[in-house]
Image: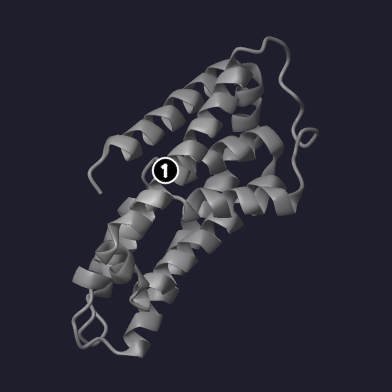
Amino acid sequence: MIGHIHLSLIMLAALIAVASPGPATLSIAGTSMRSGRRTGFALAAGVLTGSFTWSISAAAGLSALMLANAWLIEIIRYFGVGYLLFLAFKSARSALTPGEAVPVGIAAASLRGTYMRGLALHLTNPKAILFFGSLYAFGLPADATPVDLAIVVAVVGLQSAVIFFGYVLLFSNPVIVRGYLKLRRWFEGVFALAFGYAGIKILTAKL
């Protein structure tokens, strides 16, 4: 606890939300296995930028404005669902395509393009808006100072960076990559189901 901020509880809530399986972590894992560590880091950096964007917006009170105007979240929801279903389609198409897996690095997109994909993935995730909005609404006292908010943004952001980049290091490990190359179609099938499920859940959830 720092002053009147229960930082440990905030970090625990953020840890559970960020580290648990979801569109961002699945994308980071899949990209790291398919295209290597550099590309995985680029995607993770984009996701992290999106996370910082929503965190800072929530700290500035913008999330409360969005929650008061439900149509804004609805627009983001439909963009997010569309993007997740697009990822599901790409993974399903890859799973249904026979043949050898492409060696790591050969099919890697440009780092900038990969970064933008990660950013788009997190900026169109309505769950991120709700999470950060709740975190700042209920995790901080009403008299929290700008310094308090800055501490929470920095600490949660640092923790998220460790998690996202840790996923890259884990799933770009040569042992895991070799497993992916052997079982590519099975992995892609799992990714297709997971992205599709996430998209449908967001579409049907009451936000």
Position of residue 202 relative to residue 11, above or below, is above
Q: Which residue is nearer to you in this view: 180 or 113?
A: 113
In the image, what residue occupies the spot 54% across and 40% down?
27
Tell whether 111 sits left or right of 31: right
Secondary element at image label 1 = helix
**Lateral position of residue 163 relative to residue 16, left or right:** right
- Around disc 1, counting alpha carbons within 10 Å, would you say few (fewer than 14), some (14 to 19), or many (20 or more)? some
> Could you tell me which residue is drawn at 51 percent across and 28 percent down?
88
Which quadrant of the figure contains the N terminus?
bottom left
Image x and y of residue 51, in percent: 46, 61
**Residue 14 visible, this orientation:** no
Q: Is residue 16 above or below residue 202?
A: below
Residue 187 is situated, as x and y percent measured from the top left of the image, at 54, 23
Say which residue appears at 54% left-offset and 63% top-offset: 49
Does 39 sit left or right of 130 as displayed?
right
Quarter-of-image position of residue 205: top left
The mark tally for this picture is 1
Give the quarter of the image for residue 141. Answer: bottom left
Work out whether 94 lies above or below 57.
Answer: above
Q: In the rendering, at what x and y percent does residue 109 appear?
A: 75, 42
**In the rendered image, which residue does mark 1 sit on?**
78
Q: Position of residue 116 (x, y in %)?
A: 64, 53
**Quarter occupied by residue 157:** bottom left
